[in-house]
Amino acid sequence: MVSSKVLLEGASGKRFLLLGNEAIARGVLEAGVGVVTTYPGTPASEIADSISAVAPDAGLYMEYSTNEIVAIETAAGAAMCGVRALASMKHVGLNVAADAFITLAYVGVRGGFTIITADDPYCYSSQNEQDNRYYALLANVPCLEPSNPQEAKEMVSYSMNISEKLELPCLFRTTTRVSHTRGPVVFGPLKQPKLKGNFVKDVKRFVMVPAHARIQHKALLEKMERAKKISEESLYNKIVRNGSGMGVISSGAAYNYAVEAIDFLDVDASVLKLGMTFPFPEQKIVKFMEKHDQIVIVEELEPYLEMQVRAIAKNYVPHVKIHGKTITKYFPRFGELSTRLVVEALAKIAGKALPVAIKEIDEKYTQVSESVPPRPPVLCPGCPHRASFYVIKTVTKNRAIYSTDIGCYALGIQPPLRIGDTLVCMGASIGTACGISKVIEEDVVAVVGDSTFFHAAIPGLINAVYNNHKVTLVVLDNLTTAMTGHQPHPGTGKTGMKTRARKILIEDVARACNVKYVKVVDPFKIKEAMKTLKEGLKTRGPSVIIFRQPCALLVSSEKRRKGEKIVPVKISEKCTNCRVCIEAFGCPALYVENDRVMVNEALCTGCMVCAAICPYDAIEAGGSLDE
Amino acid sequence: MSNCNVVLAGVGGQGILLAANVLGSAAAKEGFNVRVSEIHGMAQRGGAVVCHMRIGDRVHAPTTMEGEADVIVGLEPVEALRNIKFASSQTWVLLNIEAIIPSTVSLGTAAYPSLQTIMKMIRLFAGKIVTIDAADLARKAGSVIAQNTVMLGALVATKKLPMRLETIKNAIRELVPPKYVKMNLEALELGYGVLRNSDEKRRDELDK
Ligand SMILES: Cc1ncc(C[n+]2csc(CCOP(=O)(O)OP(=O)(O)O)c2C)c(N)n1
C-alpha cells in the first residue's frame, strides 16, 4: 500500500516502512535489474506488482508471464545475454518451473539471475507448505534467506553479485512472514538498469544435449566449490550473539522468534544466524559447534539446516548434542513457528520452567473457543463465481463430480454451494477430470479460472479432446487473476508495463484445440446459462463453456472511480421467508435478523442474481443507499 | 523503552491492513523499530483477519506472543474474542460493538454469542474493555467505512502507543486516498474523544 512512487523516488539514506515484498522491489531497483518476470501467487505477488507500478518510469522491463516456467525461461534468456534478471513466484510455482530451473544451473548465466521463491508455512494461501530450500540443494545453486525487510532489500544486490561471480542462478527464499511483514528499510542508491545485452554464442554451454550436459554438470560442481568459499566468508552467515550456554543456529523468519524467545526466557545462548544456507558454511559451523555442548536448530518446516548440521557434526564434533526436529523433536516439522513455540522448546532444553501464564491462557481459551463461530473466507458479495456455481449445481442436480482448480472459485466448496470434489494444483481440474470420466458413469464437470486456463489447463484440454474424454470444462472467466490481486493475464488485454495488448480469447483457444462444443455465457443470465450447460453436458466428447462476467471487486471499484452509484437490492413484502437466497445461493449481503431476510446495503453490489433465483419475485432493484 | 504490542482483529474488508499500516508508518516516522504483520490472499475475502503491530528496540518477530498484547483492537466483537489469547490482565481491549455475522451463522451451523457473553469471556483474560460504537461515529464522520479509523483514534487515546497523535494524522494524510483524508481525520478525532470521555464516566463499568 506504500505509494509505488516511494519505491522509485525515496532518497538514498532515508528510512521507509515497507512490506518485505516492497523492500525486495526496491532492492531490484538498487541492483540495476533489467528484466523482471513473474506469475502471481501469494505470498510473492507484491514483489512484481510493485515493480510493475514503476517499471516504465524506472526504465526496466517487467512482464506477467503465462506461467512460472515461462517466467524463469524469459528471465534466463535475458541473463544469458548479460542483463540482470529476476523471476519471482510462490513456492509451488517453482514446481511448475522446475524443469527449466534445474537444467539452467548447468547452463548458467552471464548477467545476474535471481529466482525468488516465496514459501508459505502454515499454508495461509496455498495448497501445500513445501520447503523450497531443498530446490537449491537439488539443483546445486546458492540459496539466500532474508529474515526481515531490510535484509530482503539488501540481499537482492548480494544475490546478483554472487550470481555474476559464479555465472549461476541464485535461489532467494522468503516466507510469508518475511514477505508480508512491514519493517523500516533504509534505502541505498538506485542503479540504472541495463536493458540491452548481447548474446555471445557458446554451443557447449547453452545447448544441453547429453554430451554437453555431462561436462556442464562437472562445471556446476566446480562452481559450487567456489560458492562454498563465498558462504564461509559471507557477512550474512554470522554470530550475532555470544553467550556461554547453548548455541542456537537459525535462519529466515525463524531467527526472529529465536532471538525473542532467548530474551523472553533470559537464557544464556550464542546465536549463529545464517543468511546463505546453501552451500553450507561448513567450517564456520564447525567452529561454532566446537564452543558449545548443545546446539539448537530453530527453523521452519523441514529439518533442512539440521540435517546438514548433523552431517557436519558427525565428521568433526560428534560429542555435541543437537536438538531440532528429528530425534529429540523439540520443534514441529509442519506449520509456522512462533515465539511461543520456540520459548517452549528452549525452556525444555535449558531446563527452565515454562511461564505459567501461557498454560493458564490455553486452558481459559479452550473454554471460550467453542463460543467463537468460525468465519471462513467466502466468495465476495456479487461474485460471478457464485452465480456460475448456482447454475452448475442446479443443472447437474448436484449429482456430477466436480473437479475444481486454484483461484477464488476454490471457495465454492463452502456451503451452501459446495462445488468442488478434487483440487490439486493449477490445471489439475481438467487433467483429473479426464481420468475420473474414464472410470465412472456420472457427469464430470471441471471448473477452472481464466488465468489458470492460460497457465496450465491447455495441455489438459488438448488431452481431453484428443483422447475423447467426456468432460465438460467450465471456465469461470472473471477477466482477471482475482485471488492474487487482479494481475493481467493473456485474456485481459493489459500488460505489466501498463500497455495494451491484443486479447487472446479463451473460446478461440478452445476451438483451436478442436473442441466441438464451445459456448460463452453470462452467469448473471441464469436461465440462458443453465440451458447452455445442459446442452454442453449432452454432447459426446469434451465441451467447453465459458462463464464470462467481470470480477465484482473490479466492477465496484470502476463504478466508484467514475462516481456511479451502486444500487443495492431490496426485499419486498412478497418475501415468504423461504430463504432460498440464503440457503441455496448464500450471498453474504443477505442475512437473517429477527427471522426476516435482510439486505446489507453496504455489501450488496446489485448484481440481481438473487432476484433472478427468488421463487416469489420478492427481491427487486432500488434499495436506498444513504451512506 | 519496553515493547508495545497491538493486535488488530476483524473481518476482511474492514480496512485492518490500512489501519496497521498507518500505525506502522507513524512509528517509523518517529524513528522507532517496528514490525507489522499482514496476511493476504485466501485469508481475506470476508474471512477473519488479524494484524500485529509491534514497536521496540528488541522487536524482531512479526507476531505477538500469547498474553503479551498491550491493546487488542477488536473491529468486530467475535474477532476480538477469537484473538483473546494475546491478552493478559494488563491488556486493554477496545471493542467495536458492530457485529458482522459470519456465513456459518447465517446458514445455521454456528451461533453468534450475545455482546454480553462476549464481554464476559473477554473479561476472563483482559484487564479492561472499552466498548465503542464505531459504526455510529464513522457515520458521523461521513461514512461507515471509517470504522477502522475511529478505532485507531480510540487506540491513540489509550496512551499505550509511543507515537504522537499528530504523527498518526500525518500517516493518514499519506496513506489514505486524498478525497477520504478529511473524513478519516474526523473519524480519528471522534474515536479519540469517546475514550477520553468514557474513561471518567464509566469507570466502574469498564474496570474488571
Ligand atoms: C503454480 C501456482 N502458481 C500460482 C499460484 C497462485 N494462485 C492461486 S489462485 C491464482 C489465480 C487464479 O486466477 P483465476 O484462475 O483467473 O481465478 P480467479 O481467482 O480470478 O477466480 C493463482 C495465480 C498457485 N496456486 N500455483
Image: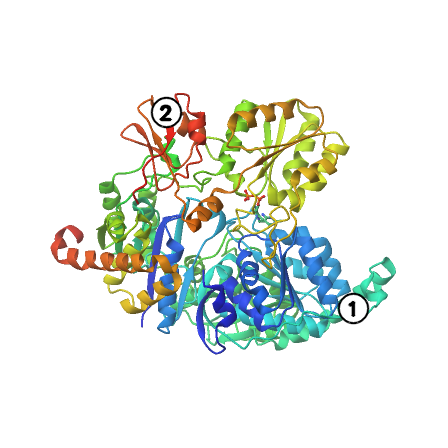
Q: Does the image show residue B192?
A: yes
Left or right side of B177 for A125: right
Name the residue: 40% across, 29% down: A582
Q: How crowded is the residue under tag 2: few (<14 C-alpha within 10 Å), some, or many (20+)? A: some
Numbered label attached to residue A199: 1
Q: Which residue is mark 2?
A: A618
- Residue at point 27%, 62% (across, down): B156
Circle 1 SS class: loop
Q: Position of residue B48 (x, y in %)?
A: 40, 46
- Badge 2 and badge 1 in a common chain: yes
The picture places residue A445, in percent across and down from the top left corner, at 61, 30
Task: Please report, as a chain letter, where disc 1 is located.
Answer: A
Mark 2: amino acid: Ala
Residue A151: give its label. Answer: none
Which of these two is toward me, A617 or A62? Answer: A617
- Read off the chain for label 2: A
